[in-house]
Image (spheres, grey):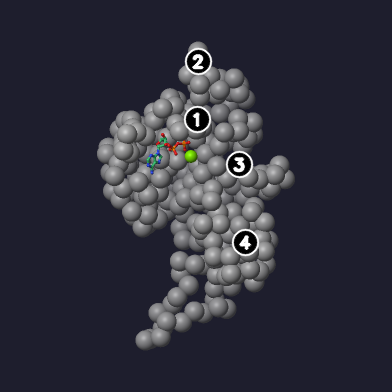
Amino acid sequence: MEKITLGTRKVSIEFPGVKALSDVDFEIGTGVIHAVMGANGAGKSTLMKVLAGSNPDYTGEVLYNGNVVELRNTAAAKKLGIQIVYQEVDMALIPTLTVAENVMLNDMVMNMGKKQLVNYAQIRKDAKETLARLNVNIDVKRLCSTLSLAQKQMVLIARAIQHSCNFLILDEPTAPLSDTETEELFRVVRHLRETENMAVIFITHRINEVLQICDSYTVMRNGTVVDTTPITSATTSKEIVDKMLGRS
Ligand code: ADP
Ligand code: MG
């Protein structure tokens, strides 16, 4: 499958009183699971938001297949197949709607003549197909308010991959999950890498998870990228911690 790359060159972001990112160079290609690590406040979410078009005031360049692209809104990122799922799943879901409706939320109203109509049969069918791409079994007629947090996350991942998705960014997805739910998420993430050649970028603090599932990782500290490295059988948790804390 064709490999696509996404990266940044000297990307910086300044919030009032805080330099959240300083000259960040970063690159990732499709077909890998990649961890972004670092202490709280290191700039992980800020960098991922730049890639998702949610931090429009960045300076520097975002590169897609080596070409400069302007990611000044989420629509521009989505057009390139860059999708992000935030940790606050409840903010992105409408609890009183079904799984099908929440998966298809961005495509629900079809323009049919002068009337705005929702084709519920089609929505259920499309949502089912998308969940099948994740190899996840959730009844699409259920209300989202009845789902577990892990299932809600799957609904949002389904929404994210509903259209073409090359880069799926998950911001601390495992933080609220049990061990079993984390295993299930990893199964889904691996499945997307194998079957769709997606890049899945996930932010995490948990080093054992990174060693278990990721192909490579980036460590950030104080708004900079400290290192990006493949994970091999020789990678140790100690070297990752040392990079995160800046010890030698
Ligand atoms: P991380 O995800 O690694 O924990 P963040 O990227 O969220 O870190 O934050 C990096 C720095 O930028 C922190 O100092 C944080 O307080 C600051 N920051 C992030 N977003 C904003 C914002 N919208 N306004 C002001 N400061 C922000
Ligand atoms: Mg964060």
Q: Is mark 1 within 8 Å of ligand 1?
A: yes
Q: Disc 3 vs disc 4: which is toward the camera? A: 3
Amino acid type, mark 3:
Ala
Q: Residue furthest bottom?
A: 114
Q: Which residue is mark 1?
A: 38
In the rendering, at what x and y percent does residue 135 appear? 65, 57
Amino acid type, mark 1:
Gly
Dot 3 or dot 4: first in sequence order is 4
In the rendering, at what x and y percent does residue 32 appear? 52, 40
Dot 1 or dot 3: first in sequence order is 1
Residue placed at 37% from the left, 49% from the top? 54
Q: Which mark is residue 132?
A: 4
Q: Which residue is mark 3?
A: 175
Dot 3 or dot 2: first in sequence order is 3
In the rendering, at what x and y percent does residue 138 appear? 67, 63
Amino acid type, mark 2:
Arg
Q: Is 191 on the left or on the right of 220, as rendered?
A: right
User: Cα distance, mark 3 to mark 2?
Assistant: 25 Å
Q: Which of the two residues, 137 or 53, is positioned nearer the viewer here?
A: 53
User: Cα distance, mark 3 to mark 4?
Assistant: 25 Å
Residue placed at 40% from the left, 49% from the top? 52
Q: Which residue is mark 2?
A: 247
Dot 1 or dot 4: first in sequence order is 1
Residue 93 visible somewhere in the drawing: yes
Few, some or many residues within 10 Å of mark 2 (<14, 14–19, 20+): few
Q: Is 154 on the left or on the right of 30, as rendered?
A: right
